[in-house]
Image (spheres, grey):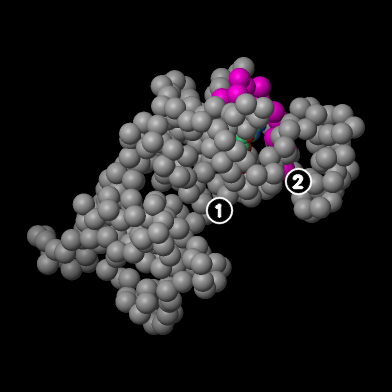
Amino acid sequence: MKRSIRIGVVTAWPEDDWHSRQMLSALGRRAEALAIDPAALSANVAGGTTETAAAGRALLDVDAFVLVRGLGRAGDPDVQFEIYRALEGGGAVVMNRIEPLLAAQDKFRSSWLLARAGVPTPAAAVAQSPEDAERALADLGEAVMKPLAGSLGEGVVRVRPDAAGRRAVGERAARDGALYLQEYVPHPGRDLRVFVVGRETRAAIVRHAPPGDWRTNVAVGGRADAADCPATAKAVAEAAAAALGLDYAGVDLVLGPAGPTVIEVNGNPSWRGILDATGLDMAEAIADHVLGRALRRRLSSAHIVRERTGATHG
Ligand SMILES: Nc1ncnc2c1ncn2[C@@H]1O[C@H](COP(=O)(O)OP(=O)(O)O)[C@@H](O)[C@H]1O
Ligand SMILES: [Mg+2]
């Protein structure tokens, strides 16, 4: 008996959140899509297996999960993350996977994973004391100080290796307990956001910083337009998503003097700005990708069952 592919969209806001609605309708056109509230998840470990449920409904027959808003407004985030790990560990398709998501959220981890994979990314440093922060600034020269896990351009500050810069990094290290610094890459007030799905570039926009700022985040007043993405930037963005292990990602690139370099990788990227600027709907691309993975998994597990039972026809 074949049943249709069933895909869970993990979100606490299936109606109020635009991305959740988009994902549910894109998936609903291809498969059976159900909204799963992260705070409604539970699990039982018994008899050598782990069974996961959402609001008491077993999730055994759900082929894949898309974590659109993976942390709920209620419940416990650590439990929710662990349930996604258990789902992955049990062989379900989970997208994005938890470890890559956490890697993308952590700017230091992103830096070293990208560097190790040979993906161009600015020199960076972490320090836990004001002295080390000052030393790192002296090494890097003109730099950008950022929260280790931040977004929307919040707390992103340019610092120079002078007295004011030393004071700024020292104070941030003392206040937060740790500091992340990235070499400043000169750019003409614009950068690229490249959307990668399934190892392929699907869309790109150029983001312009608002007057008087050098940050291009739409949240600080940046403006976005459709962009022709140079082949080198596509290749770098695709390599960045692969280095972190993300099924889909928004990769921020600056076209610096030495070519494209990855400023940061977003593992839970918005696709609203991309849709507005390009008309390309990343929900469709993600839905195609997750469906492909779910179908391949279905085929490979059918193959395993056939081998185990000695059956030759399905
Ligand atoms: N190393 C850098 N060199 C030049 N500009 C940068 C650098 N790092 C960040 N920026 C600018 O600041 C913006 C916000 O930084 P980012 O690392 O993307 O943090 P966030 O997670 O808050 O978006 C970027 O989109 C870019 O325009
Ligand atoms: Mg950013």
Residue 34 appearing in the image:
yes
Question: Could you tell me which secondary element the residue under label 2 belongs to?
Answer: strand
Q: Residue at x 69, y 44 (%)?
A: 155
Q: Residues within 10 Å of mark 1 (few under 14, many from 20)?
A: some
Residue 200 appearing in the image:
no
Q: Position of residue 102 (x, y in %)?
A: 55, 53
Q: Quadrant of residue 4?
A: bottom left
Q: Judge from the rendering whether residue 239 lies leftward or rightward of residue 166; answer left or right.
A: left
Number of the label disc, if any, that sits on residue 311: none
- Disc 2 vs disc 1: Cβ atoms closer than 8 Å? no
As for residue 60 lying within the magenta part, the answer is no
Question: Could you tell me which secondary element the residue under label 1 belongs to?
Answer: helix
Q: Residue at x 35, y 80 (%)?
A: 56
Ligand 1 in which quarter: top right
Q: Judge from the rendering whether residue 34 lies leftward or rightward of residue 173; answer left or right.
A: left
Number of the label disc, if any, that sits on residue 179: 2
Q: Residue at x 33, y 40 (%)?
A: 281
Q: Which residue is mark 1?
A: 102
